[in-house]
Image (tube, rainbow, N blue to C red):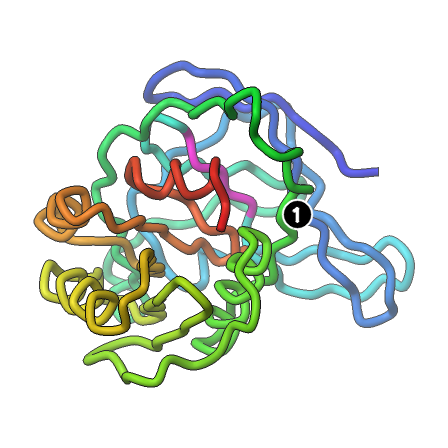
Amino acid sequence: MTQSVQVRCPACRRDQMYAPPVYPCACGAPVEPPLRTDEPAQMVTHRTWLDDWVTVRCKTCGRRDRWPRPELGCACGTILRVPVQGDPAPSHDASSDADHAWPTPATPPGPAHIPLPPTAPPPRPPFKPVPIRSARDAVTAVALYLRWLGYRDIRRADQRPSSGIGLAARGVVVQVEPSVRPATLRDVECLWLTCMTESAPVCIYFSLAGYDEDARTRADELDVPLFVLDLAGMPQPVNVPADELIAAGA
């Protein structure tokens, strides 16, 4: 049974329940990181590839594998790292991390949860993410999320974007940026122009490293949903259009 813990955000003091993702061991047994309840969650202000992973032992076969370290996105925009039993806290030695640093963009305060209207369809089941270890994994995670939203027949886009990877489905054009470079204003505008060219009503951007400030501002003006991917494969909405898309679905 998945272990749930109460997590308090040190930035806004908001409490929320968190259950870690469950991963499949090579033996077939489910594996989940054992969370600590005696230590507070830490704000993520600096990323390195090594620090974003945690070693977890399978209780069935004893195998030890590296999985994405448990993280939680607070509604205030803060990314929280949940401590794991038997695992040391990530180091922040800038000299040793310089070659592996993942930039963490300053995310604006997240909008409040948008309640479903009385006539809305039944809520979707919880999204089951897949860990991201490569660009292909990022595309797989996004494709699964699009299906969860209700899009079908997802394929590679006909038009190749200037950066990242393009996906498309009926009524939507999507761009996935799996690099450590935050998406720029030009990236968002190019996606929007492609959406206009394809006569698609919706375009969505997914980025592993976040967005420049002017890119977020332009996305709000163009009504482009923006999501940040964490290494667990869970997309986190970073603007109002993204929250509205989650509430409404495809």
Residue placed under numbered mark 1 in the picture: 21
Seen at 36% across and 66% down, the residue is 174
Q: Which quarter shows the N terminus?
A: top right
Q: Quadrant of residue 179?
A: bottom left
Above or below, 155 against 218 in this view is below
Q: Please give the name of the residue rendered at 70% of the width and 55% of the height, measured from the top-left corner.
A: 56
Q: Nearer the viewer, residue 81 or 238?
A: 238
User: Would residue 110 be found to the left or right of residue 194 on screen?
Assistant: right
Q: Residue furthest right?
A: 60
**Residue at x 74% of width, y 64% of height:** 64
Q: How far across and how far down the image is residue 172, in percent?
A: 38, 63
Q: Is residue 122 placed above or below 164 in the rendered structure?
A: above
Residue 128 x/y as whole percent: 65, 52
Residue 147 or 101: which is nearer the viewer? 147
Instruction: Identify the image quadrant of residue 184.
Output: bottom left
> Residue type at mark 1?
Pro
Magenta-drawn segment: 70-74
Question: Was residue 191 drawn as part of the magenta stretch in this picture?
Answer: no
Q: Around disc 1, counting alpha carbons within 10 Å, would you say few (fewer than 14), some (14 to 19), or many (20 or more)?
A: many
Q: Judge left or right: residue 4 versus residue 49.
A: right
Q: Looking at the image, how many numbered discs can be counted on the residues?
A: 1
Left or right of 4 on screen, residue 215 = left
Q: Position of residue 117 (x, y in %)?
A: 51, 23
Q: Secondary structure at mark 1?
A: loop
> Most prominent secondary structure in the magenta stretch?
strand
Q: Position of residue 42 (x, y in %)?
A: 43, 33
Residue found at x 41% / y 43%: 245
